[in-house]
Image: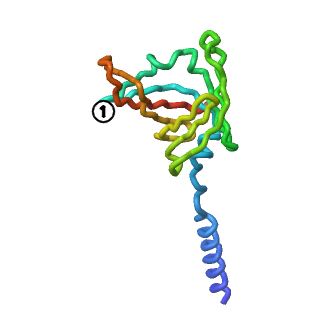
Amino acid sequence: MKRFFSLSAIVSVIFSMCITSCKKDDAPPSKTQLITSKSWMENKIELTYAGTTTDATDFFLDDCQKDNLVTFTKDGSYSFNTGTDDCSGDEPSEKGSWSFKNNETILNISAPSDTVDLTLVAISSSALKVSIKLTDFDINGDGIDDDVTEAVTFGAK
């Protein structure tokens, strides 16, 4: 009888250890948690035209813009803050609101002067990538507006 008790006690301990060590992993963070957990700095711009993607960072992103921060908050507001290099004083800071649309595939930004829907391409704890189809953009110089998509990647700060 003593032997049976020892064996059942050992089995119980092992079973208890298996149950407590097999808990579910934490759920991955939501897109809202990811976008609001950090501030974001623009670091790459790509243009896609006629099936070809080109890195246009050097053409569209001045060095003085690379220290600007965008911060999204859980209450649906955002702020764009000019960094210490403000491009000769011509880059104002702004505040507005943001929200996700279409099952968190669209990032809607409402600034004081405009509202824009950005396609959410990717988001992680270290990077945010959005895109928008450009209108009134003649990339090849033929005088006709072209079908161009701009993708902007932000790094987490």
Quick one: which residue is furthest to the top in this view? 88
Residue 93 in the image: state x and y as whole percent.
66, 23
Asked whether 5 or 59 is in front, the reply is 59
Residue 92 sits above or below residue 36 on the image: above
Residue 30 sits above or below residue 157 on the image: below
Asked whether 96 or 35 is in front, the reply is 96
Asked whether 72 or 142 is in front, the reply is 142
Q: How many marks?
A: 1
Residue 3 sits above or below residue 37 on the image: below
Asked which colour scheme the image uses, the reply is rainbow
Which residue is located at x 56 percent, y 20 percent?
Answer: 66
Q: Secondary structure at mark 1?
A: loop
Quadrant into which the N terminus falls: bottom right
Dot 1 amino acid type = Gly
Which residue is located at x 60 percent, y 56 percent?
Answer: 26
Quick one: which residue is furthest to the bottom in this view? 1
Residue 23 in the image: state x and y as whole percent.
60, 63
Which residue is located at x 67 percent, y 86 percent?
Answer: 2
Q: Quadrant of residue 155?
A: top right
Q: Which residue is tagged 1?
A: 51
Residue 90 in the image: state x and y as whole percent.
62, 13
Residue 157 in the image: state x and y as whole percent.
62, 30
Which residue is located at x 32 percent, y 19 percent?
Answer: 143
Q: Is residue 148 left or right of residue 72?
A: left
Graded by Cα atoms within 10 Å as few (under 14), some (14 to 19) or many (20 or more), the crowding at tag 1 reads: few
Quick one: which residue is furthest to the right in this view? 75
